[in-house]
Image (spheres, grey):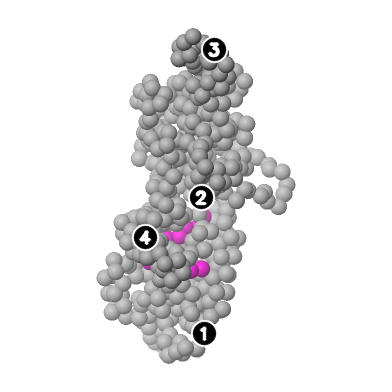
Amino acid sequence: MKKHQEKYEVLRAKNEESLLGGGIVRQEAQHKKGKLTARERIDLLIDKGTFQETGKFVMHRSKDFGLDKEYYLGDGVVTGYGKVNGRLVYVFSQDFTVFGGALSETHAEKIVKIMDLAMQNGAPVIGLNDSGGARIQEGVVSLAGYADIFYRNTLASGVVPQISAILGPCAGGAVYSPAITDFILMVENTSYMFVTGPKVVETVTNEVVTSEELGGASTHSSKSGVAHLTAANEVLCIEQIKSLLSYMPQNCESTPELLEYSEANESRPILDEIIPENPNQPYDMKEVIHSIVDEGSFFEVHQAYAENIVVGFARLAGRSIGIIGNQPLILAGVLDINASKKAARFVRFCDCFNIPLLVLEDVPGFLPGTDQEWNAIITNGAKLLYAFSEATVPRVTLITRKAYGGAYDVMNSKHIGADLNFAWPMAEIAVMGAKGASEIIFKKEISASENPEQTLQEKIDDYNRKFATPYRAAHRGYVDEVIMPSESREKLIAAFSMLENKAVNLPRKKHGNIPL
């Protein structure tokens, strides 16, 4: 027994050294780049004393191109399971100091193993990505490893939450695993994602571009929308992962944790003053959100991308909810291609994991223009329509001001399955704005008038009285109740409490065909 124990201690010491990147020198090199090691990242993420490692002694099997002369136990990735704030999670953390974090056959097998366990046991998967890509020396075996991971990502989608943190390079085929997961987080100045790197881009297109410009955190959070969250450093990034997890359930069969909440005065008089008297003057929808939800609970995602729509998680009387709100401060809150894709993706995530949806609507329509039409606003706008129509979680809409045209239908209207719709008294629900509508309807009458401007204004006022109110929609049952803004929090708490046991059976089918 003593002999076995001595052998184990030797292997354990060798394992710890190799998984730190083959020694102190490589570890220090990682720190100089402003990056933590694979194990340091796990220590920050997982509750102290709960991490259980799998595949400690795994080594690569390839012997080509000098690989037979260099072995590291663990083969460049730390995998295992543990708890985050008391909840079971599965995690893999790639080690860039071992073969540049390159993915080999055995490296991939370790990741696949914990993904299979996560699905079998119904717990989130967190990937801490820091890899140069496929291990070239292993050829097609490495590519097969990536495909195995992609397949598991797809199978796990909608079954357990999947979160990807990009903590270094993530290039080539490696990017497609995070792309299939639910949320991607990046660190400023140290993480990069691209299918082809700067050198290949320059060779093929003659474009000179840096890694940061091509695929850095700023680029993917504001231009491409690939990254949902960014952080100044890895410590903050890992804290974001923990916050994100707190709003989610363990899997698609469970619900998010309901936090304790003591009833109090739920009136919010500040909301009675938030809408400007001038209907063309903007206001900040985030102020509305913060006034409605539990204090300090709003957690915005995709903040820098498609800013004309706001999405994020919050708590309402301790209940986790997803929020989608038009942002009048940006492009008057119109729906465009990027906003539609951003919101549709968020709606589908919340629906996957039983997170109720609150829609705060102030939308003047879809953004017009050749750029939008030529880049398929029709199919992209339909993505949001499809996402809401398909969703079976509790869905409540609050119309704060404008709800015009097809955008009224798309933004979780009663007609596409919303459970409850509320409107503030100043809400305008109509096919289009009063001025545009009057110019079309009364074109001949205005042209024949001795005073066209006066006649137009009279028609605008008449249109506003008849159509630009919430009461016409309320008469037909399209709006359940017209409420004072200060009552919003109280009404929404009651609504979501009533809907907590909602059950819907969709038509039997393999799956729908969302307009991708």
Residue under label 3: 448
Residue under label 2: 249
Mark 2, secondary structure of its residue:
loop
Of tags 3 and 4, which is closer to the observer?
3
* Residue situated furthest right in the rendering: 508
- Quadrant placement of the N terminus: bottom left
First reached walking from the N terminus: tag 3 or tag 1: 1
Residue 17 sits above or below residue 63 on the image:
above
First reached walking from the N terminus: tag 2 or tag 3: 2
Q: CA distance from mark 2 to mark 4?
A: 36 Å
**Kind of residue sitting beneath label 4:** Glu
Mark 4, secondary structure of its residue:
helix
First reached walking from the N terminus: tag 2 or tag 1: 1
Mark 1, secondary structure of its residue:
loop
Residues at marks 3 and 1 touching, judged by CB atoms closer than 8 Å:
no
Q: For the point 59% across and 65% down, which residue is it?
A: 151
Residue under label 4: 213
**Kind of residue sitting beneath label 2:** Pro
Residue 396 image offset from top left, x and y in percent: 53, 33
Q: For the point 57% across and 53% down, which residue is it?
A: 158
Q: CA distance from mark 2 to mark 3?
A: 64 Å
